[in-house]
Image: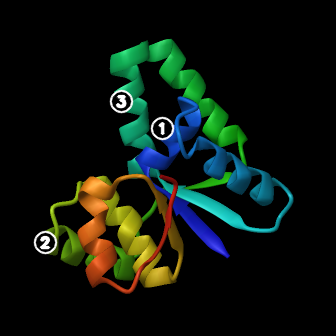
Amino acid sequence: MTYILDACALFALIADEQGGDIVNGLLEKAESGDVTLCMSRINLLEVYYCHIRSLGLDRADEIVESVYASPIQVIGGIEEPVFREAAILKSRYRVSLADSVALAFAKALDYTIVTADHHEMDIVDQNEPINFLWVR
């Protein structure tokens, strides 16, 4: 099974918030090869700039480097089916651009999106054939 993290899922892990244990469990499964864990580079950008603002550039760099060193596969490119699906989802729902990309990967490639973002994602969960793993 393949899981795709949104920024909220990674925030929960980094800050040891509620749901971080679920993300950590997925990391352990990915390390042992039981699942594939990925994240769009656009979602990682969201994590990076938020941590630059809150913790400074050096700490934000450390966080990004720890993601690169982890079993999380960072997806840099967006192929045509995901590109188009992200645009459709962004136009239908009030989701961030980064989240529309993560959702599009989940929908177009049958990944499960890992999130805590009920504010943006509940309506998508109710209306789209996308698998969600809610961390809180």
Quadrant in the rendering for residue 97:
bottom left
What residue is rendered at 32% in x and 54% in y?
98
Q: Position of residue 128 (x, y in %)?
A: 31, 83
Does residue 28 appear left or right of residue 97 in this picture? right
For the residue marked with disc 3, what is the amino acid? Answer: Tyr
Does residue 60 appear left or right of residue 125 in this picture? right
Number of other residues with Cα within 10 Å of mark 1, as a class: few under 14, some 14 to 19, many 20 or more: some
> On residue 11, which mark appears?
1
> On residue 91, which mark appears?
2
Label 3 residue SS: helix
Q: Earlier in the sequence, mark 1 or mark 2?
A: 1
For the residue marked with disc 1, what is the amino acid? Answer: Phe
Q: Position of residue 69 (x, y in %)?
A: 71, 39
Which color mode does the image show?
rainbow
- Image depth: mark 1 or mark 2 in front: 1
Label 2 residue SS: helix
Residue 75 visible from this viewpoint: no
Q: Is residue 66 above or below residue 118?
A: above
**Image mark count:** 3
Q: Is residue 69 above or below residue 127?
A: above
> On residue 49, which mark appears?
3
What residue is rendered at 37% in x and 73% in y?
104
What residue is rendered at 17% in x and 69% in y?
93
Residue 51 visible from this viewpoint: yes
Q: Earlier in the sequence, mark 2 or mark 3?
A: 3
What residue is rendered at 49% in x and 48% in y?
9
Q: Is residue 76 above or below residue 10?
A: below
Q: Position of residue 106 (x, y in %)?
A: 46, 74
